[in-house]
Each structure stands twice: as C-alpha cells, then as structure tokens.
Amino acid sequence: MRHIRTIIDKEWAEVFKNRTVIGMLAFMPLLFTLLPLVMLSVTATQGMEGLDAASAGVPANFLKACAGMNAGECMQVYLVNQFLLMFMMMPLMIPVTIAAYSIVGEKTTRSLEPLLATPVTIVELLTGKALAAAIPGVLITYLSFIVFVVGLYVIKIAPLVRAYILSPTWMLAILVLGPIFSIISVMTAIFISSRVNDPRVAEQVSGVVIIPLMAVLLLQLAGVVVINLAFMLSAIVSCAILAVGMVYLGTIFFQRETILTRWK
Amino acid sequence: MIHTEDLTKVFKIGKKSKEDLIAVDGLTLDVNEGEVFGFLGPNGAGKTTTVRMLACLIGATRGSAEIAGYKVGTQNTEIRRRVGILTESPGMYERLSAEKNLTIYANLYDVPDVEKAVGKYLTMLGLWERRHDPVGSFSKGMRQKLAVARALLHEPKVLFFDEPTTGLDPEAAKVVRDFIEELKTEGRTIILTTHNLDEADRLCDKVGIFKQRLLAVDSPQALRERLFGRKSVFHLRAVDPNWQALVSLQPGVNSVEVVGEKLVVRLNDPENDNPAIVKALVNAGAQILFVGELRHSLEQIYLDLLHQKDMEGKK
C-alpha cells in the first residue's frame, strides 16, 4: 500500500500544479452542473398549460417515465435524463485529462526509467496511476451532483421531478457507473498515452471514450432508448466487465521492458 | 558482487525487418565487491542495455546474471532493493521540489526513516538550501547531483552510473567525480559507463572495453601493458645514430625507436632494465637529460581495440 499511496501522492502533487489540468477540473463540473440548473429553471417558468407531453416533443416511449406528471414536469424529466448523460461525461473526461498528462509527462521528463528501477511492481504502478486519475473524476462528479441537488431546491423544481432525479436510476449512475466509467477512461488514456508524446493528443484521442455515451444521448433524443432502471443495470454490468477486461489487459500488456522500450 | 555469464540481448526491430539487433553479445564478467568498473564503448555499443539488464529493467535474451547473490530474472525485487541507478537522463519531477522528489523515491525504496535519508543526501550534495525549490529551476549540475542523491537514498550496495558527467560543465563534473571517489572509499561496488576516458582512468579499478561484446577487461594499467608493453623514454641532449643499435643489444629490450632527440625503448621490466641502458648510453658519450615512462592514454587503448574489432568485422 505504501507504494500505491506514494504513486498517488506523486501524481497529485505534479498534476495539480498543471494549469491546464486545473482549468479542466474546474470548467467541466461548473458547466455540467450550472447548465442543467439554468435549463430546468427556464423550463419551470415556461407555461405549458393546455399541452400534453407528447405534443411538447417528448418521444412516445419516454411517456411511461412521466406517469402522473403534467406536460411541463414530463418535459423536465425528459431534459433531466439528457443531463444525466452530461454528468456521466465528468467521470469519463476528468480522468482522461489527468492520466494523459501524467503518463506523457513521465515520458517527456524521462522519469520512467528511475521509477521502474525501484522495487515498485507494475500492478502497484498502474493501480497508483489509475487511482490518482480516477479518484478526482469520481469525487468531482459526486460533488457536482450534490451541488446540482441543492440547486434543485434553490430553483424550486417540482417535487416529482426532484424525486425522479433522486431515484435509483440516477443514484446507480452517479455512485456506481461513474466510478466504472472512470476506470474505463483511465485505462483508455493509459493505452493511448503509451503511444503518443503530446498530452493534448493523448487527451483528444482518449476522448473516444465519450462516443458510446454520445450515441446513447442521441438514441434517447430520438426516442429509441430510454434510460431507466433496467437500462442502467445492464449498462453497469457490461461496463464493469469491460473495465475488468481493460485492467487485466493492462497488467499483461505493460511490463517493465514494454514501458521502457516502447513508451517513447 | 556482480557476475554475468553469456549475457545477451537481442532486440526485434520492427515487424518487417528480418534482422534482429544484437545489442549485447555473450557478456561474461565479474566485478568484485568494492570495485569501480568502467564500461567503455562508443554510442550504441550496448552499455546502457547492459546496465538496464543488470538493474532488472529489461530481460536478457540469453545467459544469466547475479547481483549480490540474487539472480536477475527471478529475484528482481530483491536486486532492485540493493541497486541504485543514475540513469543517462536525470528524469526528475520538475514541478516538484528537490525534497519532494527524494521523498517519493525514499518511499518507493521502502527507506525506514525517509526524512533522515532525504536530509542526509541533500546536505551531502550541497542541495539543502534549495530543497524547497522546484527541480525545474535547477541547473543541469544540480539536477545530476539530485539524481545521484536519489540513487543513494536506500544505501545500495551496488550502483550503476550511466554517463554521470555527460553534459555537465567541468565544475559540476568534478563534483560528481569527487563524489564517486568518496563512494568508492565506502566500499560500494560501482558500474560506471562513460565516454570520458580520463574519468574512467581516474576512477576505475577495472575497465571493460565494449562493443556489443567485451573486447578487453582489466585494470587500465594492465591494459596498457598488455597492448603496448612498457616503454621508457630517454631524453638526450643529442642522438647519435649508433645508439639505437647499442641500446637494442641490452638485456630486456624489445625494441628501440628514435623520436627527435629521444630514444623510446620498449622493455619487459623498466625498473630493472633502465639502469643498464643509462650506463651503456653514458659510456657511449650520451648526455641524458632525464628518463621517463611513456604512458599511453586510455583513449589510445580504447581506439586501438575498437579499430581491431572493426578490422575483424571487415574480414
């Protein structure tokens, strides 16, 4: 544990002195927390009397999620479900940024060789690096969610909509799927960073991790899928399998010699 | 302390290339405890690859190595605990302070009293006053000193110094060299790879001249004697052409050359043979100004051996 703690301490000490990373860590949560609050606040004040949810533009197969709600509340729940996907971008994008700067930074300063000469094991090294990148992503997502929930009370959102946001679907997404997403994004960043020499390139290429999330967002907008509890549970299971597979591949693929001779 | 047997490293160079790159070919070597061993060789000779294999950073393709009684390949963690390495590039965390850099490594090496070890080496290498400064603000020499401190934090028995003075100004290079001399007196075993042959001559008990394989290994003095023999130089007021023949008849003389106003005499045992030659020259009327030993530089030995290897390669 001492080695893993040291690696995490080193990563944070270094990465959090990087203004680009700090900017990213501050900007994304602010945007993804405030934007939904503003949009919910605007839609809450718009009169939708006389309209039903279907004619307000909510896809037909989403209407089941609006049982007992009026058109305005249904529209807000529909919007909220898109915001959930924006929230889920945080545990994907924040670890990518940290991991990209951390690994490419090691390459540019040539600090990998002395690091690998220590008794630290590759599992400890990868675990330390992965946790150092994943923990801030998860914590910032949690913190943003708390701010978002507090904001819902401030803007006096309808109780039914608030209950929907505090439902198991959202809770599982934020508390369980978020950390799994972080692991997937860290491993993606580690794999990609090992092949490039510019942290910005690593960050951009690693951005592919948001493509499946964007696809879900578009499919939901088109009314093809609805993010409900069943969808969330199946997403958790499949993403967990993917994360375990990626970690396993990482420990096989990254050996001292590979890191030293191929991470150039 | 260090023993290698037929240690070989072959790199696969790309999927399309049919030829493999033999970086190190059958290295068999012994370095005793407390010795400073100099690895000399041109760029691409395989010196760094050898150090990386011995430091358990990369695996050998063939052969075996043992460090401090532990086998490379199967007891790597034990070896890493006992080995300190100064890599070719210092590789420090530039945004972090000198103290933080060393603290990280002391923890990774499981040093029991981190604060004490870090303080000791920061003081010893004259970096204590700058301990809170980010390493990015350090000069090249200071970074190298910090890298030396990092290699010593866990008090390793064996040290690998890969080009420790390359790129340093003469003053910083001297500080590093003096420190290596100090480490030598502490009885640590040191492997030094260098291009600086004077440095190797000064610091090393033994040197190995290396180009993929070991071309020669011995103390610098023994290598000189083996390659060039021992030569005495008789500086004369003036040289008579007959004196060359006269000297060549003396016992123990292998050859005599006239170079300007000097006679360069290759001898088996100068300490015993010089007096007789002096006597013969004085009797023949020579005025001897002084007598000295012709000392070939390590550079000459190095170039000569590499030239021989290249010629063998062409045949």
Image (cartoon, rainbow, N blue to C red):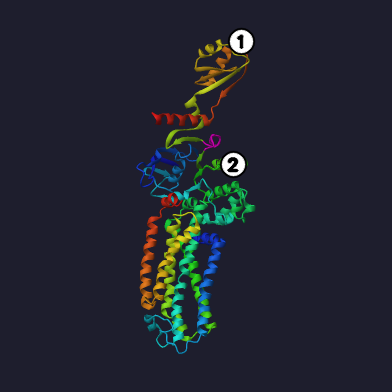
Kind of residue at disc 1 = Gly
* Viewer-proximal residue among B19 and B197: B19
The image position of residue A214, as x and y in percent, is 42, 70
The circle on residue B173 is: 2
> What is the quadrant of the N terminus of chain B in the image?
top left
Main SS of residues in magenta: helix
Chain at tag 1: B
Chain at tag 2: B
* Viewer-proximal residue among A68 and A163: A68
Q: Earlier in the sequence, mark 2 or mark 1?
A: 2
Residue B38, above or below B83: above
The image position of residue B162, as x and y in percent, is 51, 43
Tag in front: 2 or 1: 2
The image position of residue A228, as x and y in percent, is 38, 78
Residue A109 visible: yes
Kind of residue at disc 2 = Ala
Q: Residue furthest right?
A: B129
Q: CA distance from mark 2 to mark 1?
A: 49 Å
Residue A235, above or below A18: below
Residue in the image at 60% along x and 55% along y: B134
Neighbour tally class for label 2: few under 14, some 14-19, many 20 plus, Cα within 10 Å: some
Instruction: State the residue position of label 1.
Output: B285
Q: Is residue B202 magenta?
A: yes
The image position of residue A199, as x and y in percent, is 50, 58
Mark 2 residue element? helix
Q: Residue furthest bottom?
A: A50
* Viewer-proximal residue among B179 and B256: B256
Residue A160, above or below B113: below
The stretch of residues the image draws in magenta is B195-204
Residue in the image at 59% along x and 56% along y: B97
